[in-house]
Amino acid sequence: MTYTVKFGLQSQSDRGPIIARTAEEVDAALDRIIAAAPTYNHNPSAFVLERPRFGRLQVPDHGLKIDIDPTHHVAALAWVGPGFDCPWVSKSDRPVPEASLHKDIGAANPFPDDAAITLDQLRAAVHEFHESGGHRPTCVRWQEAEGF
């Protein structure tokens, strides 16, 4: 099955939504998201349109949240979805304590230092998220987190 990812992007330099159905469109969306990183108003997010939604507001049953520190060329991910009792954030063997990465930019809620992954890992994880229909990517390591 082919899946469609809807990216939310709110920055001073670019706004979404961005719809991506193909690998090329996912790459183009990520290029825009990475380029806009210095001016984010809110964390970029992604969800698969074909997955279930719930409630009156039709909230997706899953989601991927992104932050990028362009100065240090790193990113961090938060994922929530069915089959898990809590949100998860990316985990790296190489913490980057000087990176500015937030689970919630508006509330200045930081990711753990060891959540920083490379931009190549970010790209691979988002592609896997797309190809798997919104499941938690396995190409990066994860750790349990408080709050999404």
Image (tube, rainbow, N blue to C red):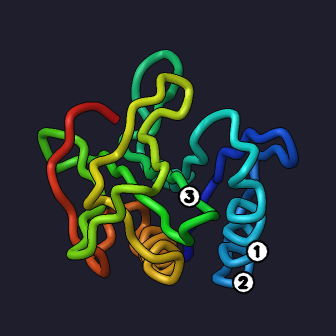
Report x, y in % for residue 68.
Answer: 56, 58
- Element at label 2: helix
**Quarter of the C terminus within the rendering:** top left
Mark nearest the camera among 1 and 2 is: 1
Which of the 4 image quarters holds residue 34? bottom right
At x 69% / y 54%, what residue is drawn?
37
Question: How far is mark 3 from mark 1, CA to CA?
Answer: 16 Å
**Mark number displayed over residue 28:** 1
Q: What element carries label 3?
A: strand
Which of pointers 3 and 1 indicates the residue nearer the eye?
3
Q: Quadrant of residue 115?
A: bottom left
Where residue 111 sits in the image (x, y, percent)? 34, 46
User: Residue drawn 76% across and 74% down?
Assistant: 28
Query: Spatial distance from mark 3 to mark 2, Cα to Cα?
Result: 20 Å
Residue 2 is drawn in which quadrant? Answer: bottom right
Task: Specify which label sits upstream in the sequence, 3 or 1.
Answer: 1
Q: Which mark is residue 68?
A: 3
Q: Which residue is drawn at 55% across and 52% down?
A: 46
Query: In the image, which disc is placed on residue 105?
Result: none
N-term mark: 3 or 2? 2
Amino acid, disc 1: Ala
- Residue picked out by circle 2: 24
Q: What residue type is labelled 2?
A: Glu
Cβ–Cβ below 8 Å for labels 1 and 2?
yes
